[in-house]
Amino acid sequence: MFSSLERWSWGALWLLILVPFMTTHAQNLLPASTTVRAVAWNPDGIWIARAFQNGTVNIVNINTGATVFTFNNGQSPATALAWRPGAGSTKLAAAIGNNIYLWDVPNTTSFYVLDSPGGTVDSLDWTTQNGDKLASASFDADSPNLRVWDTTNGQLTFGVGIDQLGIASWNSNGTQLVIGGGLTIETVDPITSQIQMLSSNSFELSAVRSVAWSPDGTKIADSGVFGQVTFRNASNGQFIAYSEPSRSLVNWISWSNDSTRLASASWDGTVRIWKAANGALLSTIQPNNGRVFSVDWSPDNSQIVVGSENGAVQIFPAPSATPYPCPCSLWSNSATPAVLDYVETVPLELGVKFKSIVNGFVTGIRFYKGAANTGTHTGHLWTSTGTLLATATFTNETASGWQTVNLSTPVAITANTIYVVSYYSPSRHFSYTFNNYFSSPWVNGPLTAPAHTPTDPNGVFGLGSNGTFPNLNSNNVNYWVDVVITQ
């Protein structure tokens, strides 16, 4: 049924669900009995357009729920949508069958019908920069399958054939398009016809399905069959960050209008929201309506609209790019131990177990120091089973109080996964608080130090040499070791 989309799916791909899941209730728009192939929020935030597998395009007023426009010419399917940018815009482009329709909503009479012979149009992107132009892309059409139209007169101004064309997206000034062609990311100049490879797409290692230029023009994102979203520098294609692969085809990606976040619609039934600066996962939304085909942002970036396989169209709140005031730690700088100094008979590795409710990066290690705790201190970051992830030596320490060392390379951590952070005290001195400190979880922002249990203790230490994994415990003592994370 989805010939132009099924080509991207290489059999049964494993499903990897990432966290956290967004549990906020969705606003449901009028349901349909056929797959939603595309959704698009108009620039004023009042209407949402929907394109369906049965060839219908309709527009719903999100404030009243009323349908303000419906069109179906008997062709199937309706596959792509694009609103003309700009405040007050009422013009919509939609691909249905072999035609692209341009309407001035709510007038149901199109002002142009653009003939697009060949295969299904997979994407439309409209720009008013450097002309009033509409770009269309289709995977398996006869050449040309990348086309640019002048929407003021309905004339085709550019066309070229691209092998395994994915989706085309304009840059911020309307002078270039970015496309996915097979395994490569390329830019196309529709004036000079110059095509330049930006990246070989070595991070995805599968055909590019989705590609999008950020609204501010600085970044390009792409994804494909394996569901890994990659962020690149738009000027030179240099890799910036990439997300964890979802192991399921990402059918569509959409930038927030402020270019800080990216939403990906996946065939594993989820929408994931990524932080553009570092590829960190901000949220996972699971509509529970089958494969997700499309996603778009509200003009104010506070919500997303999602179109799914079973015909559901839902609106969800979108997470902020900075949901927590990170850098974040377990304890504030004003927190102090009950006992500032204690001395043992042997050097110690002192630590604490922690987890984060969001994906992020460990950038530093902290510990509280009493005046007698002298010598060279070394910080360590571990997995819960003792694999060493990072080491850093503290320098320029103060006589007492909180000490911090930054890691030379930040370490990515996965949400809701236990890690251990520790430091080595060669002088045998340390600070602590007893009184069953971890009898309940300690929570600060996105970070948690889990509660102590007999089978899974917290407040841990190791005896002996520098870098001994701290897997011993003494009744959930807090040794005042801390971590610094960013998102």
Image (spheres, rainbow, N blue to C red):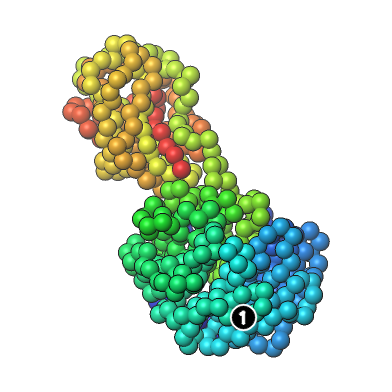
Q: Residue at x 55, y 75 (%)?
A: 148
Pick whichever, 100 or 476, lies toward us: 100
| Depicted 140 relative to depicted 458: above or below | below
| Depicted 103 relative to depicted 260: above or below | below
Give the residue type at disc 1.
Gln
| Residue 34 in view here | no
Give the residue at the far left of this rendering.
Answer: 465
Image coords of residue 53 (percent x, y) = 62, 80
Pick whichever, 46 or 329, lies toward us: 46
Give the residue at the far front of this rendering.
Answer: 192
| Depicted 461 relative to depicted 434: above or below | below
Q: Residue at x 73, y 79 (%)?
A: 111
Quarter of the image that includes the N terminus: bottom right
Q: Is residue 397 left or right of residue 275?
A: left
Q: Residue at x 28, y 42 (%)?
A: 389
Q: Is residue 135 left or right of residue 238?
A: right
Q: What is the count of numbered marks?
A: 1
Q: Residues within 10 Å of mark 1 (few under 14, many from 20)?
A: some
Image coords of residue 98 (percent x, y) = 60, 86
Image coords of residue 450 (percent x, y) = 44, 36
Please name the residue that numbered disc 1 is placed on. 155
Image coords of residue 202 (percent x, y) = 32, 64
Element carrying mark 1:
strand
Q: Which quarter of the picture shows residue 346?
A: top left
Q: Which quarter of the picture shows residue 429?
A: top left
| Depicted 72 relative to depicted 292: above or below | below
Pick whichever, 200 or 463, lies toward us: 200
Q: Residue at x 38, y 59 (%)?
A: 237
| Residue 174 in view here | yes
